[in-house]
Amino acid sequence: MADADGLRVLTWNLWWRFGAWQDRQTAIEAELAAARPDVCALQEVWIGPEGDQAELLAGRLGMHAVVAPSPAPGRWQRRLGDPAIGFANAVLSRWPITRSAVHELPAHPGEDGERTVLHAEIAAPGGTVDVFTTQLDSAPDRSATRCAQVEEVVRFVAARAGTAHPPVVTGDLNAEPDSDEIRRLCGHKTAPVVPGTVLVDAWRYAGPDEAGWTWDRRNPHVAATFEPSARIDYVLVGPPTAGGRGHVRGVRLVGDRPVDGVWPSDHCGVLAELGGAR
């Protein structure tokens, strides 16, 4: 990396314990090792009697980890038929995580609150970096619920983000770039939730012909749903500092092809390279 205090940030939904999860675990480890991220923001991380996926990955990659279990995983456990397996967001970091916090997001009316946003303060060489990750409601008809969740995410970011580095907000947002919820989250195509808090979608720095589908019908796990391809996973970053810290240098997909015949997840990940101060 050209900048001494640059940052490689990856976000990825790991599809919990669905499918051939043990084979997928091997493929996930291979992809993460090849991508060499400084920070991994992960969604649908499993927690089981034998340990948790985030800590396992952190051990393999030589990283620190913080995990935020869902406060209400019952719906997921019923789908899997195993009440012993938890469900979480997580952040892994090459550098120490000096503090963390979790905030519960509003649920769809009549449902338990299962979604959270996780904050990890990372002691990167160039100064503290505040990283946030979340997963919003996935039902296609719940834009209003996602908008309510976005408002909580933005307030949480505004309250906890420092000034040394623009905040980095990541996750499986289950919404396409032109949706109300993404416009509300970014805050520069509509009134921001918190005045002065705006975020830029890193994929805007990709090539003009790169669709960036993170939910891709080429993946058999996606094809089985009969849903169209879409870009629903994001790395978002606040405006760069006056010296250029946090500017997007590049962005690409991770996990967008099988590893030894195994697709690592039903989602592709997004890896953004952020520059340091000049």
Image (cartoon, rainbow, N blue to C red):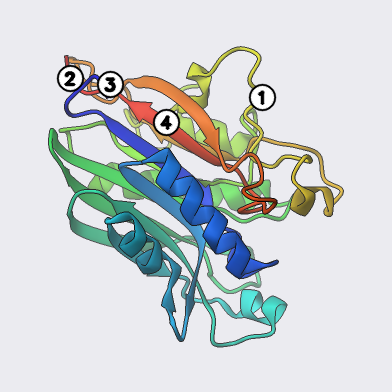
The dot on residue 240 is 3
Q: Of helix, strand and loop, which one carries label 4?
A: strand
Q: Does the image show residue 198?
A: no
Upstream in sequence: badge 3 or badge 2: 3
Labels 1, 3: front one: 1
Q: CA distance from mark 4 to mark 1?
A: 15 Å
Badge 1 crowding class, 10 Å Cα cut-off, few under 14, some 14 to 19, many 20 or more, is few
**Does residue 74 lie above or below 60 as drawn?**
below
Amino acid type at mark 4:
Ala
Q: Which residue was labeled with disc 4?
A: 272
Image quarter of the C terminus: top left
Rendered residue at 51%/35% (across/down): 184
The amino acid pointed to by label 1 is Ala
Disc with the residue nearer the chain's start (4 vs 2): 4
Q: Residue at x 42, y 21 (%)?
A: 250
- Inspect this view and state whether residue 83 appears: yes
What quarter of the picture does the N terminus occupy?
top left
Asked whether disc 2 touches disc 1, contact meaning CB atoms under 8 Å apart, the reply is no
Q: Position of residue 15 (x, y in %)?
A: 61, 60
**Residue 277 marker:** 2
Residue 81 vs 126, above or below: the answer is below
Residue that carries the numbered disc 1 in the rendered image:
211
Tell me which label, 2 or 1, sits earlier in the chain. Answer: 1
Q: Secondary structure at mark 3?
A: loop
Mark closer to the chain start, 4 or 1: 1
